Amino acid sequence: MSRQERKNMIDFITKNREIHSEKLMYMTDDEIEHIYNSTYYHFEEIIEG
């Protein structure tokens, strides 16, 4: 994943979950992507209501 993709994912995660970006900086791309996907899925479920 590119640096910009990673940054965008981290921004989305920190805005929608109670996770600080410092914790995410030490995670692998796969871990970030997993957290992003689960956060996005949860966010999508809330919007669709």
Image (cartoon, rainbow, N blue to C red):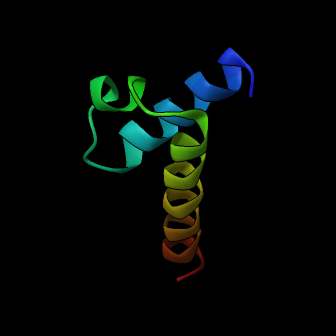
Q: Nearer the viewer, residue 44 or 25?
A: 25
Q: Which residue lies furthest to the right in this view?
A: 2
Q: Which residue is drawn at 49% across and 32% down?
A: 10
Q: Nearer the viewer, residue 48 or 24?
A: 24
Q: Position of residue 30 (x, y in %)?
A: 60, 43
Q: Which residue is drawn at 68% across and 18% down?
A: 4
Q: In this view, does 9 lie above or below 36?
A: above
**Residue 17 horizontal side relative to residue 2, left or right:** left
Q: Where is residue 31 in the image (x, y as percent from the top left)?
A: 51, 45
- Which quadrant is the N terminus positioned in? top right
Q: Where is residue 47 in the image (x, y as percent from the top left)?
A: 55, 71
Question: Looking at the image, how many numbered discs can be counted on the residues?
Answer: 0
Q: Nearer the viewer, residue 48 or 42?
A: 42
Q: In this view, does 29 lie above or below 16?
A: above
When asked about the image quadrant of residue 24, the answer is top left
**Residue 16 horizontal side relative to residue 39, left or right:** left
Q: Residue furthest bottom?
A: 49
Q: Which residue is drawn at 49% across and 69% down?
A: 42
Q: Which of 39 and 31 is in front in this view?
A: 31
**Residue 5 horizontal side relative to residue 46, left or right:** right
